[in-house]
């Protein structure tokens, strides 16, 4: 009996050891599943983080470009509103009388007025040039819908076909952006 008790105790111990081993294996399997889940979550978070960083970088680049564009054309409306002043100056310069007034004093006043108007006009053009505003070339230019607006066409022969014949209102650019199209007569 003694042997049977010993065997029985050994069986119980063996069963308990097997149960403990089984529990340990189950626990290891659970822990391995948790580790795999955590690694998967970590990979997802790293991917989301990477995407978020790329998205932010794109946002930053886009807003910087928008700010740069805004700074380049911030004064566009002001310059557009100033363009009629240039037109008025040019009309006034064209309207100078060809004959001088009678008398030395009248002649001096006329020359002073003409010189003053020319000086203001040149300073104004210089100011606009410094700000990046410049006239669109129209003299003997090919008609270009990106810069010119045709107000009419005129039969001018084969050599003038598609070319600007006359400019009725100057066009202007701020940098490379057209802020007023040149109104032109085009040959046909």
Image: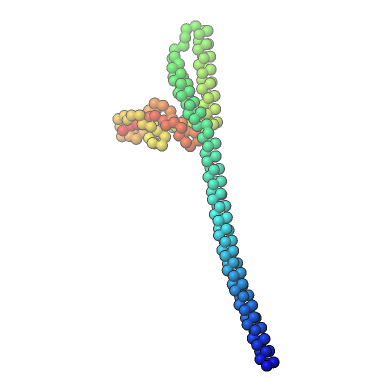
Please say whether residue 16 is visible from this viewpoint.
yes
Relative depth, front residue between 58 and 33:
33
The image quarter in which residue 43 lies: bottom right
Give the percent coordinates (x, y) of residue 124. 53, 25
For this view, does 166 lie left or right of residue 102?
A: left
Relative depth, front residue between 99 and 23:
23
Give the percent coordinates (x, y) of residue 52. 56, 52
- Total marks shown come to 0
Q: Residue at x 56, y 46 (%)?
A: 60
Above or below residue 94? Residue 21 is below
Question: Split into 4 quadrants, where in the image is the N terminus?
Answer: bottom right
Please say whether residue 165 is visible from this viewpoint.
no
The residue at the far front in this view is 1
Above or below residue 45? Residue 5 is below
Above or below residue 27? Residue 87 is above
Give the percent coordinates (x, y) of residue 141. 40, 34
Q: Residue at x 56, y 49 (%)?
A: 56
Give the percent coordinates (x, y) of residue 143. 38, 35
For this view, does 187 lie left or right of residue 34?
A: left
Question: Split into 4 quadrants, where in the image is the C terminus?
Answer: top left
Q: How is the image coloured?
A: rainbow
The image quarter in which residue 9 lies: bottom right
Relative depth, front residue between 95 and 145:
145
The residue at the far right in this view is 2
Q: Residue at x 48, y 26 (%)?
A: 81
Q: Residue at x 65, y 81 (%)?
A: 17
């Amino acid at each position: 009996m003694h042997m049977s008790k010993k065997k029985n105790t050994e069986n119980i111990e063996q069963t308990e050891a097997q149960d403990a081993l089984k529990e340990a294996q189950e626990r290891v399997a659970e822990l391995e599943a948790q580790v795999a889940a955590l690694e998967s979550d970590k990979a997802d978070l790293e991917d989301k983080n990477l995407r978020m960083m790329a998205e932010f970088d794109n946002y930053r680049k886009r807003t910087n470009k928008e700010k740069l564009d805004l700074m380049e054309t911030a004064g566009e409306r002001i310059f557009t509103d100033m363009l009629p002043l240039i037109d008025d100056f040019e009309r006034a310069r064209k309207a100078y009388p060809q004959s001088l007034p009678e008398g030395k004093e009248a002649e001096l006043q006329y020359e002073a007025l003409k010189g003053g108007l020319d000086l203001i006009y040149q300073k104004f053009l210089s100011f606009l040039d410094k700000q990046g505003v410049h006239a669109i070339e129209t003299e003997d230019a090919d008609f270009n819908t990106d810069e010119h607006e045709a107000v009419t066409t005129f039969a001018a022969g084969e050599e003038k076909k598609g070319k600007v014949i006359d400019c009725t209102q100057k066009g202007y650019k701020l940098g490379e952006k057209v802020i007023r199209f040149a109104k032109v007569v085009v040959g046909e």
